Amino acid sequence: MKTGGSAALCQVGTVSMEQLAYRVKQRFPGVFRWIEAGARGVTVLRYGRQIRRARADAAVQGTVRGEAAVMRPLGLDDLDALHRFLANQPEEQLRYFCSHGFDRAVLGTGRS
């Protein structure tokens, strides 16, 4: 029997995969880290070449209000600037965007 929409494919009983992942992350952070590492490994094995190609092609150059600008993925070289930028944001600006800590150690690992 077919169900409509892709959302139905991501359901486990009455709990979505996102809800299940959130619950595992909150209640069993050690287990979640292993699952996350395994998923990352599978993703890199399956899509590694496409990811590298997309990152290589990701830089966009142009102008913003008449000044030269480059939009590119952030890298470890940008860590200090990113940390300074986030540390200087008003608290109310981060009210809805606080899925992880903003200290330098967390930003450097990409983990929450």
Image: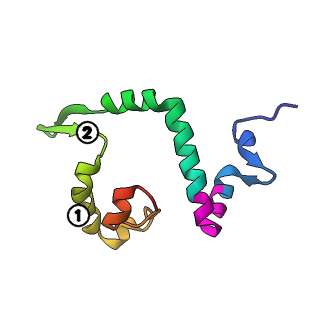
Decide which of 69, 38 is in the foreground and name it: 38
Where residue 53 sits: x, y (%)?
37, 27
Looking at the image, is 44 positioned above or below residue 15?
above
Residue located 40% across and 55% down the image: 110
Magenta stretch encompasses residue 28 = yes
Is residue 95 left or right of 58 when viewed as pictured?
Answer: right
| Nearer to us in this view, 26 or 31 | 31
Q: Position of residue 50 (x, y in %)?
A: 44, 27
Identify the residue under disc 2. 71
How is the model colour-coded? rainbow
Residue 10 or residue 48, whichever sits in front: 48
Task: Pick out the residue farthest to the left.
Answer: 67
Image quarter hosting the N terminus: top right
In the figure, is residue 32 to the left or right of 89?
right
Magenta segment: 21-32
78 part of magenta stretch: no
Residue lying farthest right? 1
Q: Amino acid at mark 2?
A: Met
Q: Earlier in the sequence, mark 2 or mark 1?
A: 2
- Which of the 4 image quarters holds residue 81? bottom left
> Helix, strand, or loop for circle 1?
helix
Residue type for callout 1 = Arg
Q: Residues within 10 Å of mark 2 (few under 14, many from 20)?
A: few
Q: Residue 20's spot in the image, x, y percent?
A: 69, 57
Regarding residue 81, the answer to whether it shows in the image is yes
- Which residue is depicted at the point 29% across and 63% down? 86
Residue drawn 64% across and 56% down?
A: 21
Magenta: main secondary structure equals: helix
- Residue that carries the numbered disc 1 in the rendered image: 84
